[in-house]
Every structure is written in structure tokens, then in C-alpha cells.
Amino acid sequence: MTGEILASLKVEVKEAIEAFRRELSRVRTGRAAPSLLDGIQVEYYGTKTPLNQIATINAADARLLVVTPFDKTALNAIDRAIRTSDLGLNPVNDGKILRLPIPELNEERRKEFVRHVRKTAEDYRVSLRGHRRDANEMIKELLKDKDIAEDESRTAQEKIQIATDDGITSIDGLLKSKEAEIMQV
């Protein structure tokens, strides 16, 4: 029984780390990356549609993204969606494709991105601690119902703590590398 709880916790920790990694890929670092536009939703025939489902996104060079819609009539909707996003990008529309020049980040903007990334990392750490609490409560419930012995309970809680610590260490490592990437000029 404790093995199932621990396995479930490890899956939740792994999913949280992957979600954090996806979240970090959306943060601008001054270089053009197609993942920068992952969160953009475009009003397409009355439905909010992810940008990557109605257009191809390519990094032409380190400072330029090129968005090529599958349907040319969606070009203005894509343009509008990118302009209204919080990315601070101004697309250049030539009637067939959108060119998105990625401006150089100033020091103040870089520090703002680092603060945002740190806050996001803390949110994911809190999430991991919540998963740890839930797993520990399940173990305590098993102990209370006399389904497991105290030694087994203590061992399971130690393993839960180790799994949580490993997850937090992974998040901290991802955070540190992203901060370095953002602050790199």
C-alpha cells in the first residue's frame, strides 16, 4: 500500500517538474524560440485556437521569429493575438507571413523576468509540498486504520520526503539555469 502512495507521489512530482519546464520555455530570454508563442490563443472562426495549430512558427535567426499561417485569412487574427499578449512583441505583417523581431532585453526587463521565474518556481515548490502533505496524510490514515506498522509508516514518510526533496532540487536546478540564461547579455 505504501508503495502505491510513493509511486503516485513520484508521478505527481515528475508531472510538476515537466509543467515547470514547459512554463520556463515560455519565458523570453532575448533569443528567438518558437516555444515563446506556445501560450498564444487566436480567435479563429469564433473559437480560441492555439497559435501552433493554425500556423507554423520558425526561428529564422537569433532575433527573428517567422509565423506562417496555414490559412492566409487568419493572418490578421494572429497579428492581433500576438500584439495583445503580454510578450511585448510587434509583428510585421507582409500579407503572407508575420515577422516577429525579438528586441534586446534591457537590464530592468531581465530582472523583471527573473522575479517572475522565481515566483513561478516557488508556486511549483508549494505544489510539491502539497503533494507531500497529501501522501503523508494517506500514510497516517493507513497507520490509524492499523493497515501498516509504525516502522513502515516512518520509512514511507522518509521516502516521501526524499522524493519531494529531489523534486524541489530539480526545480531549483531548472530555475538557476533559466536565471543564468535570462541574465546573459
Image (cartoon, rainbow, N blue to C red):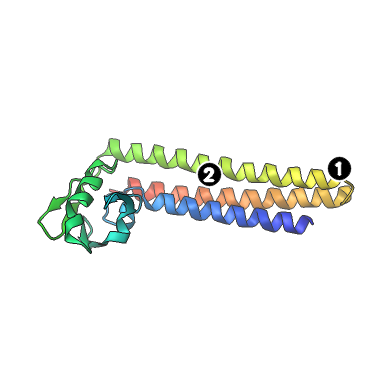
Residues marked 1 and 2 touching at CB (< 8 Å): no
Rendered location of residue 143, percent (x, y): 85, 46
Badge 2 element: helix
Q: Residue at x 22, y 51 (%)?
A: 78
Mark 1 vs mark 2: give the one in front.
1
Q: Which mark is residue 124?
A: 2
Helix or strand or loop: what does disc 1 sit on?
helix
**Which image quadrant is residue 98 in?**
bottom left
For mark 2, does the 10 Å Cα neighbourhood hold few (<14), some (14 to 19), or many (20 or more) residues? many
Image position of 37 with respect to 144: above or below: below
Indicate left or right for 123 with 117 as reference. Answer: right
Q: Residue furthest front?
A: 46
Up the image or down, 72 lies above or below 28; here it is: below
Picture residue at 75% right of the left edge, 49% below the top: 158
What's the residue type where badge 1 is placed?
Answer: Lys
Circle on res. 86: none
Residue depicted at 56% across the width and 43% down the height: 125
From the top left corner, tell me how far across and down residue 41 is, in percent. Answer: 32, 49
Task: Of the two numbered discs 1 and 2 on the same chain, state the one appearing first in sequence.
Answer: 2
Cα distance between the residues tagged 1 and 2: 30 Å
Foreground residue among 117 and 73: 73
Going by the numbered disc 2, the residue's amino acid type is Tyr
Give percent across and percent down for residue 113.
Answer: 35, 40
The residue singled out by tag 1 in the image is: 144
160 sits left or right of 16 in the view:
right
